[in-house]
Amino acid sequence: MTSPTSLNPWRRYWAALIARWRRRGTLGARGERAAATFLRRAGYRVLGKNLRTNVGELDLLCLAPDDRTIVFVEVKTRRRTPDQPAKSAAATPEDAITRHKRGKLIAVSRGLVRANHWEARPWRIDVVAIEWRDGQRPQIRHHVDAVRGR
């Protein structure tokens, strides 16, 4: 039988892990709200958020300012603190868009185009990268047509 003291480190580990997951979810939701506000101010219309398909999920679905182009948006958010190690501080939100992630974004976008009969409309995949530094407003970068390979 295990003693209660030997379980204590595991409890701390799981509590820290759960707290980290919760923070990530909250940060991601804040980032998606900030991206939606940013895009609206730039003339985009937000048509949907967190769209799920059998292939994956899409953060935002927008209509470009030209009122014709469908824009699939992936939002990547990172929090920055002054005491963060140099290695992790160098990793930008854009670095999270790996080749695998690009493939998933293309597959999800193609599926939504087919399902909604948007084949005749122009469409693209944008990335909105957000860096949130403690006590500051977020830095937002919008990469138009960031994922190609349709």
Image (tube, rainbow, N blue to C red):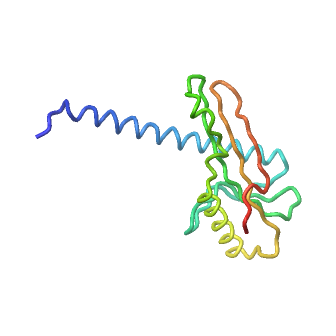
Q: Is residue 16 left or right of residue 77?
A: left
Q: Is residue 23 left or right of residue 57?
A: left
Identify which residue is drawn at 61% across, 54% down: 98
* On-image quarter of the N terminus: top left
Number of labels in the image equals: 0
Picture coordinates of residue 13 (x, y %)?
34, 36
The residue closer to the viewer here, 47 or 143, is 143
The residue closer to the viewer here, 93 or 26, is 93
Picture coordinates of residue 40 (x, y %)?
79, 48
* On-image quarter of the C terminus: bottom right
The residue closer to the viewer here, 71 or 106, is 106
Image quadrant of residue 3?
top left
Picture coordinates of residue 31 (x, y %)?
65, 42
In this view, the residue farthest toward the right is: 66
Identify which residue is drawn at 60% across, 57% down: 101
Identify which residue is drawn at 67% across, 75% down: 115
Image quadrant of residue 86?
top right
In this view, the residue farthest toward the left is: 1
Q: Is residue 27 above or below residue 145?
A: above
Q: Is residue 148 above or below residue 26?
A: below
Picture coordinates of residue 73 (x, y %)?
71, 55
In this view, the residue farthest toward the front is: 87
Identify which residue is drawn at 57% across, 34% down: 88
